[in-house]
Each structure stands twice: as C-alpha cells, then as structure tokens.
Image (cartoon, rainbow, N blue to C red):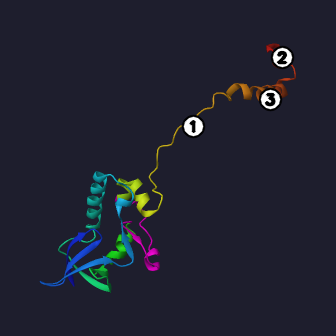
Amino acid sequence: MALFTEKIEDTFIFRINILKTAPCKLYGIKLYDVQKCTKDKKLIEEFNNFYKDQIYKFIRPGQNFYISSNKNLGDSWLCEVSNESKILNKTLVKHSLAIPKTKEYKKIKLNKKKSEIEKKFPQIFECLSGKKSETKEPEKPKEINSTKTLEEEKPKIIIEFRKQFGEDFGRDFGE
C-alpha cells in the first residue's frame, strides 16, 4: 500500500513510507500530451488543468493504492495502480483519459458516453486520441445552383406536359 500524493505531468507520486516515495508511470497506457495538438499557451494550460481534474476523479491525493511495479525506468517505475475495486490504468482508458499501448489495454471497451474532455475540447480530443469526435457540427445549408434552375429543367417539363396534355402544349408560348 502506498499513499498517492500528486501527479506531475505523466508521473504519479506515491509515498511508500516516511522516507521513500515511488514515482510511477502507468503501465500499458500513455497519458495525453496536448502540446502535440496546439501551441496556444492559454489553451494548453486550460486543458492540462481540466485533464488533471478529470484524472483526480479516479485517484485523489491522500488515498491509498496498491502499486505493482513492472520495471525500473531509472528515475521512475512502470506501475499498475489499483485499489480494492478498480485498476487505475484500465479505468483511465475506459473513460478516454489515456491511450492504450498494450494488447490487453486495447481490448478495453470504452464508455459509450462522451468523455468530459471530448465534450469540452473536441478538436484536441480528436488530435490526441486519433478518434473522430462525435460532436456534430452544424450542417451547412445546401447551395442552390440558380443557373440550372429553369433553363435546364424547361425542356424536361415541356416534354412531360406534352405527354400529358398533347403535342400542341406550349407551342403558343414560343416553343
């Protein structure tokens, strides 16, 4: 058991005891890096704050978690983090808060509901996840091609009327 203290970029910091901390990168997933999708500093900051809040819905500072470390990465560990009810790595994938990297994680079914990130940042979500956002854009009204209107349709209309009303239909109008 370890106490979660904070998330710094893509690393989760856990306190094992008074003297030791365990910085963990989550196994099998990749957290979003918004800087790939935009250069707007204000938007990056807004997204990162929102993203951190979304992750903190599932892992809050002060909560205890089990850490299964798979590999030492030098400055951090590659970990699978869980509590009694869920595995954090899989939960983040399920709620579209991380990109699966292993076969096991790619099999996870996503929530059918749109994630909060997808709702609030549809273009960034599309860029980060590689998935087309289902946010519907308003349809553009179809343009009416006014050059085609009566001039091209006139011969068809005359032929149809002549079939119905006889061959002399329209001749007294200059046709």
Please tell me which residue lies in front, 76 or 169: 76
Q: Position of residue 154 (x, y in %)?
A: 75, 25
Q: Neighbour class for label 1 at 10 Å: few (<14), some, many (≥20)?
A: few
Q: What SS does tag 2 mark?
A: helix
The answer to whether residue 152 shows anywhere in this view is yes
Where does the image place residue 175, in percent across and percent down from the top left? 82, 18
Point out residue 144 in the picture as x, y percentages from the top left corner: 60, 32
What residue is rendered at 27% in x and 68% in y? 9
In three-dimensional space, the C-alpha distance between marks 1 and 3, rounded to whole angstroms, equals 27 Å
Residue that appears at 47% across and 61% down: 131
Asked whether residue 115 is in view, the answer is no
Name which residue lies at 51% across and 40% down: 140
Pinpoint residue 102: horizontal percent, then vertical percent: 44, 78
Q: Name the N-terminal-most of marks 2 and 1.
A: 1
Q: Residues within 10 Å of mark 3 (few under 14, many from 20)?
A: few
Of mark 1 and mark 3, the one earlier in the sequence is: 1
User: Magenta part of the protein: which range?
Assistant: 96-116
- Mark 3 — residue? 160
Q: Amino acid at mark 2?
A: Arg
Please give the label number shown on residue 171.
2
Q: Quadrant of residue 160?
A: top right
Sequence-first disc among 3 and 2: 3
Label 1 sits on residue:
142
Residue type highlighted by circle 1: Lys
Question: Vertical placement of 152 versus 114: above or below?
Answer: above
In the rendered structure, does residue 111 fall within the stretch colored magenta?
yes
Q: In the image, 5: left or right of 70? A: left
In reply to whether residue 19 is colored magenta, the answer given is no
**What's under tag 3, amino acid-wise?**
Glu
Question: Marks 3 and 2, Cα distance to the nearest angstrom?
Answer: 14 Å
